Amino acid sequence: MSADLTAEERELSAMVRDFAETVVAPQAYEADRTHTLSMDVVRQMGELGLFGLPFPEDVGGQGGDYMALGIAIEALARVDQSIAITLEAGVSLGAMPVFRFGNDEQKAEYLPDLLAGRALAGFGLTEPEAGSDAGATRTTAVRDGDDWVINGSKQFITNSGTPITRFVTVTAVTGEADGRKQISTIIVPGGTPGFTVEPAYDKVGWRASDTHPLTFDNVRVPAANLLGDEGRGFQNFLNILDEGRVAIAALATGAAEGCLEAAVDYAKSRTIFGSALSTRQNAQFTLARMRARVHTARLAWHHAARLRDAGASFGEEAAIAKLVAGDAAMDNARDATQIFGGNGFMNEFPVARHYRDSKILEIGEGTTEVQLLVIARALGLDR
């Protein structure tokens, strides 16, 4: 636990860590094996107020900040990254766009259930031809009287097909100005005719997280479902993405710590050539490097979160945090698996799941290469 946490933040961390160990961890293996997101766990997270952590009380939140959200996500990711990303996406990509850019009617309609964990929402940005290059969006929304008519497809959309998913916010091209696409964001409720949530992916990792491709075939929604100003959807999402990178960095830090804790315990209990593995200098050096990665990753995301919560610029720091923490998670997962030897290749051991899960932390919500590009541009470097 970091020394810079307040007493209230330490209490939150202890509470979520206890929940993670007593409720989340026991179901993690079976949930991963069956590719099933436990709605009971989601319900309990809602009852704990986790989905409302960074939102003010006057909209149904807990009155906390992004630091509080990151603390909760880190604690969950120690034992189950799928549950941690469910919370992260539910807040950063589901509720936060409505809170940031929604009008009073949209906030009143959607936020109470989202912040209580009674409902989830997805954010439909990525497409087959528009991943890191999100400006290449091909999904279109054409105004027809009092409606938008949406056509296109999205992929890799988290929380888009759960039993409590209420809507997906979709980025779509709504026009053109000065030769450039105007991209807007539009709320598409579940069950709207022409909106199809395709079968879930068979993923390498995060297998208990709900992830689907989506298709839109002449989907008609009211013009009032426009979220934020027309043509500002892409820029608004970039702002949301900076916050999401801080949260993903917290998740990656939790994963790195989970690997470290498991590897230390295993090294102490594993006897090799008549003595504990933990007495071998090579194992000690490996574990020491793992500890250093956790420490550095936590410092990075804490710094970015504090800047964000203070209202300061934090885009570069968010990119650094995600880069450092993502690398830490992947490196620690690999080293922990090596410490475990053959057992590290068995899915019943948490380090095996972390090994599969952690790769996406170098890809999702901005690849490693995108983070490097953001940092390079902050240095004044141009292409």
Image: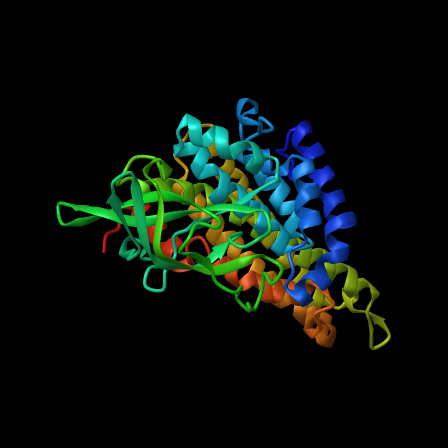
105 to the left or right of 262? left
93 to the left or right of 229? right
Q: Which residue is found at the position 48% from the left and 50% from the top? A: 191
255 to the left or right of 152? right
Q: In which quadrant will I find the N terminus? A: top right
User: Does 139 appear above or below 148?
Assistant: below
Q: Residue 41: in sight, yes or no?
A: yes
Q: State which quadrant residue 106 falls in.
A: top left
Place of residue 74 in the rendered image (x, y in percent of width and height, measured from the top left):
62, 46
Q: State which quadrant residue 367 falls in.
A: bottom left
Place of residue 164 in the rendered image (x, y in percent of width and height, measured from the top left):
59, 47
Q: State which quadrant residue 35 falls in.
A: bottom right
Q: Which residue is found at the position 13% from the left and 50% from the top? A: 179
Quick one: which residue is furthest to the left in this view?
178
Place of residue 203 in the rendered image (x, y in percent of width and height, measured from the top left):
55, 67
User: Does 212 appear above or below 55?
Assistant: below
Q: Residue 131: in sight, yes or no?
A: no
Q: Which residue is found at the position 66% from the left and 69% from the top? A: 337
Q: In which quadrant will I find the C terminus? A: bottom left
